[in-house]
């Protein structure tokens, strides 16, 4: 057909008219033999070079990818189609003896895209996903699911609500104990004036009620911790988990108090804060909601870039604090007495909180304040793109991963039931 | 053609040179028979295995998809082209006896994308869209459109403006009544000093004017509610709608006042807030603007993820409030007297409002405040990606859905008029 | 070839083995005749139905699109490839007698995408773009470019800087005149105490200097306005432009002052604000920077959706203001004396400004404040996705439009110079 | 095959039935000769026009691109496929004698996309990337890497930490010196009352300790600067770098102090701020973290558009400041005494800092404040899309560039080791 009269032939290398047909998976590509010699190290160049004259070559490979491989021979530039997976392209390029690094810069994104997605997808820890499947054997995983995954059953939901109720109850009781009217230390001071004696009588019952409430909460927390510790699938991982250590430490203030018999809230301040960290349990309960899981991955992936924000804040605080000090300290009655307090003003302005306890009054001081506030506004915005781009990435990754996992599960269930 | 001299053949399985031509919709694919045996359960493997030797197979299917199916036989990896619809791929894979779950992880996104879009598109409730078509039959839908959709006609626009005017008028009248100079309760106190008596005389007319204004507004609201209730297409849905219940409740304070004869604003405080919720009617009027509809869908889809923000705020408030209390309470004249008021400071700082009624003064207290403000800034940013990603999704979904719906309408109108 | 021994044939309709070859632009598609009868109204069904038996049809059309058209006959579902332009698909579908509305919902986005881009691109007003080309004929456009486009030449840059200098100078002079130490009205009051007489002597020269400065600025502004008015390409458009009207009105306070001879700043307050609006000229000068132009288009396109934010703010202000009033007004020394001032507090909290002049103190009042601040934070975030999605759209649209326009210009210049 | 009986032929130009086969790289395209005449200047039209009658043409070019070229002849509209690289399309269009500017507006984005990516990628300065490779020859680059790139080795990390420690130490020492209790100037004033004499005795040791600390820091900074200056690869570039000039200037206050012998902090205020700018060294140390590098490119690319934000802030400040002044100055005890201080209020409100030192109290003044705060909130949001779109762009660009660079490196190392 090709040697028929009236066929006009034209191409990149017009001199050598000797053509060759390369049949790749049924699709026939035609080119001049000289074209194939342009890439000496590649598979085709070696075949054409060494063997006897051929009119047709057959390869059982992907025909569409070969179009682009052949174009590389013709133009010397390796472009990648965006509709084919980069991983597939790399496999085929390997077969044809072409290096992936020869891809033109304009097509790097197309060549890398899927590979990057696979690498990012691999970062998503499988431990979170396997939770959903392995809970139908012995009593241990059942109890674990009961206390750890509120979405696993109705009973787990009830336990989650009860747990939340006790956390909020204990925090409320604890917060109220610091109130001047209830706190026993301050009560003595107040009792000096006789007019409010009746009120004190009335109120003095409350501390005892709060003590009882705390005891009940303590019993629940100990019970819950023991149940979780006993039923957890891996002891070392359980005691390495920060949340569980916090849980254990949060029990100390209660025990210390019951042991010593005296109330020493103020001295054990640090331990009491621990109790409030129990509130973070709400998140461990919400971890099974999809959006929260995406947020978690987003924050983990953004951590390195996000830590620049405190650094910039710290640097700006020092610079603006020092500048404000030197512009304001000469002013009579200035509250900018020293650089550390000047830095406090700078932080309050940079975060746009602006308590109003300190503010610049001189003209250069106000210029510094304006700059400071503007940098602060920019600072708030800076982490937005990092979080946005990571969220969009992980949202699509997790959505894809879950829908595929659910599909696979269905098939395996279907296969198991049909056999 | 394939058995001609000078044909060199090379492929994945070089040993068995027996080739087979698979004609799919006119496009001829060639491969070795042994290649087709690599996936034993699939349609092609069964055909090649059981039947008599064949040199060509014809299938009336999509030729482009088969390229990728055949590549699966060759390389054992199922990649998906991104230019073909995932739904089409699944249909074809089903025909060829290949499971969608065999798709390589790098191509999951390409395989799922359109299916996810269809599922998301199905979430968009059609009830909002059908509004635009069904309004040209009886008097009932006409009146309903008049009061419910301001974009339906010029008269509807006039009624919307009138309705808005009465809402604003009644709220203004109601707000002014609480002003010390007008409020009758406080007037008696003021009237004790004689110097401002003339002013009171002058002002005392105003309450009566405001009463008259309220009466007029009341008449309009009752009229509007009755018209809407009578003309609504579905009674149960109308009375289940939160906005309509609010409307009904918002009428109570007026009736109570006119019945009892005395003015008891302060006791009925809760009911008076109801009146202001009428302002939300502005949104029900704006619901027919495209951008607002996208925002509505965005907020609805982001609701689950957005509810983490109050939770984080609540947790951080407790933690930072407690920390600030323990770092500040020893300071003389400290305003951090108890944990609840310390938590108030924490919220004011976390939201970066910073009233300045409370602020930390000790060095550790200020460190807590800096941490608190930084977490607050991060907290403000956290919901941004959720809203952004959902908005971009629903914006394109709704835009596509509307333009296709409008096109279909045009065609149906055209067909109706031509026939 | 198709009737050879050993050919196995299988497809959607296995019964009728009569095959047909459809040659579209050189690519041969094969199918069963019965397949083509599934869509009775289409071009192919009519051809096969009415004419004499054919074994091959030739069409000089796009071969790739026909693959998808034929698949529609086979499966009854019309999918669109994403790599082909939606406009091209529509043209080809029209030829084959297939309606665009038959496209499956999963492929609507692929079918509409390019059309939406074209429609959005058409919104970009060409008037801004033609500015760059038409400035090389008479004196009029040259002077217009000199005063209107600072990027057109070095002289235009100098004039822009001079204009900016005079604007800033006049505003500085005007601002200083209101300072208590300079303002002649307050000077008399100050001069009562003799101790600072020497200072007054010294200062009293300043008002005269400021008057002289204002006169010089006035002369420049009149000159600039006349030059622009004379050289503008279209008089009606020039006087319809808001900025030019503001310019004209901003000249009034000066003239009024020079006419009347007395200084009546305070009475003419409104007109003096006009002067400051001249500052907006900076933007008309920056309009030729690419990023600013994108921002302008973004804001214009986002306007409808952005106007919901003030509406939500207004509604929330009323609701939270009323709620705060009813929770706070019983408290002694409360600053929440009436609903209007309560609404002021609500706005200050919603925008997270938090001056601290008013703040809630009761427990329910603080709960309202917390809700209010949280809604405020959400409110700030709400317009972000609208602006982001529009910016990304217009950024790519304008970038593409400019690069294509520049390329066309180069070619036309090249063609003009070569001929 | 084409002249066989029973072949029906139909196309865009049905009149001239003379067909031509164009074999492009093995793929045969068929069309009517008249179709090729529609674009007179192109390569195919010239061939068909001038030469003798041909039935087949062969071109050794990309077959897929030619499908779209031929479609241009058929329909007169040039559409681009999105799966092929725009650069490849342009090369092929050039061969076929078609201008890139003939591409339809709907396909401009597809045609330009990759070219824009290449241009943006070229902006990324290679100097930052080459750092990672050239550090294994002489002592000079080794020392340079030691002091400049903390990620290059463990020793470099130690030096970075030491450097950071000295920066923080010197700033702490410097900040403490301004504290009233330590500052020698204020000490004399305090010493007047005898009661705190013992405390002063105790404290007066501290200034001497701080002096010693400063001396040690000074020695380290001089050592570090000398090492960096000696080992830097390019002297001119080193002394042109802003950070290094700041480093040098930051040494001055110390020298001036040690020379003069007296402490003149307040007079040399400006120079002392320099010391704090040393804190920015943290960023030069973090420059080698990926996320920070993306942020840096993002900010550089967004600079032009971001500078509109201060401009808008400046304009709004003037406008709202003037408006607030004219609405508030009549109020007794108003803090809005003049326009400059009114502008201070406007800035504090626009940035949502809201110190509370000034706030409007009249009704029109509060309306101005509400407008001002709302514009402020919008202003904060405005730069978000610019940063987001640039970050997403540079994130993918840099990620692609790095992964390709790392791959190339691996191959070169592999090749070097194998040879
Ligand atoms: K604030
Ligand atoms: K504030």
Image (cartoon, coloured by chain):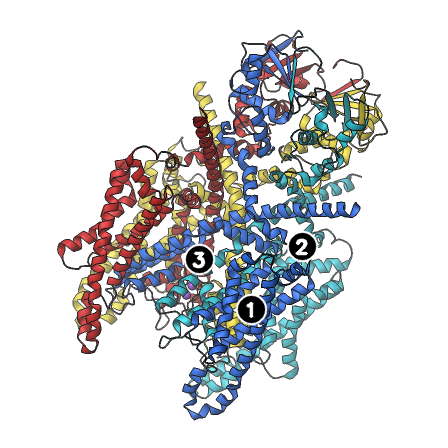
Chain colours: A blue, B cyan, C yellow, D red
Q: Quadrant of ligand 2?
A: bottom left
Question: Is D34 located above or below residue A294 in the figure?
Answer: above
Residue B330: image quadrant is bottom left
Q: Residue furthest right?
A: C15
Residue B20: image quadrant is top right
Q: Chain of mark 1?
A: C
Q: Chain of mark 3?
A: D
- Residue where numbered disc 3 is placed: D376
What label does residue B153 carry, if any?
A: 2
**Distance from Cα at disc 2 to Cα at disc 3:** 37 Å
Q: Are marks 2 and 3 in contact (CB under 8 Å)?
A: no
Residue situated in front as seen by the camera: D332 or A193 = A193
- Residue where numbered disc 1 is placed: C319
Q: Secondary structure at mark 2?
A: loop
Mark 2 nearby-residue class (10 Å; few <14, some 14–19, many ≥20): few
Residue situated in front as seen by the camera: C344 or A185 = A185
Percent across and percent down for residue D178 are: 24, 63
Query: Of circles 2 and 1, which is in front?
Result: 1
Percent across and percent down for residue D41 are: 56, 18
């Amino acid at each position: 057909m090709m040697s028929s009269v009236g066929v006009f032939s034209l191409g990149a290398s017009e001199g050598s008219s000797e053509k060759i047909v390369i049949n790749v998976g049924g699709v026939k590509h035609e080119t001049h033999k000289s074209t194939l010699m342009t890439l000496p190290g590649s598979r085709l160049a070696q075949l054409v070079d060494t063997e006897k004259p051929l009119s047709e070559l057959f390869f059982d490979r992907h025909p569409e990818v070969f179009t682009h491989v052949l174009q590389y021979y013709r133009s010397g530039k390796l472009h990648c189609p965006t509709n084919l997976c980069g991983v597939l392209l790399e496999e085929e390029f390997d077969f044809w003896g072409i290096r992936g690094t020869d891809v033109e810069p304009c097509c790097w994104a197309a060549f890398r895209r899927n590979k990057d997605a696979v690498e990012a997808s691999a970062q998503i820890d499988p431990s979170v996903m396997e939770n959903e499947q392995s809970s139908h054997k012995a009593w241990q995983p059942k109890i674990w699911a009961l206390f750890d995954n509120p979405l696993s059953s109705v009973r787990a939901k009830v336990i989650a609500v009860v747990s939340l109720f006790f956390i909020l109850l204990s925090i409320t009781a604890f917060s109220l104990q610091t109130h001047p009217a209830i706190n026993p230390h301050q009560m003595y001071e107040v009792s000096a004036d006789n007019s409010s004696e009746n009120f004190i009588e009335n109120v003095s019952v409350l501390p005892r009620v709060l003590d009882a409430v705390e005891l009940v909460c303590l019993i629940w927390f100990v019970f819950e911790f023991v149940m979780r510790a006993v039923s957890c699938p891996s002891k070392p991982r359980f005691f390495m988990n920060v949340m569980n250590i916090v849980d254990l430490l949060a029990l100390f203030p209660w025990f210390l108090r019951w042991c010593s018999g005296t109330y020493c809230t103020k001295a054990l301040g640090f331990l009491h804060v621990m109790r409030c960290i129990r509130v973070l349990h709400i998140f461990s309960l919400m971890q099974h909601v999809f959006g929260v899981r995406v947020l978690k991955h987003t924050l983990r992936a953004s951590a390195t870039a996000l830590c620049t924000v405190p650094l910039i804040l710290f640097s700006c605080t020092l610079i603006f604090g020092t500048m404000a000090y030197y512009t304001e300290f000469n002013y009579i009655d200035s509250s900018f007495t020293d650089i550390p307090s000047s830095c406090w003003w700078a932080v309050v302005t940079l975060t746009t909180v602006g308590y109003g306890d300190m503010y610049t009054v001189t003209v250069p001081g106000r210029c510094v304040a304006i700059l400071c506030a503007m940098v602060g506004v920019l600072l708030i915005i800076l982490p937005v793109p990092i979080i946005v781009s990571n969220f969009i990435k992980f949202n699509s990754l997790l959505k894809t991963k879950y829908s595929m996992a659910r599909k696979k599960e269905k098939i395996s269930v279907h296969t198991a039931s049909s056999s």
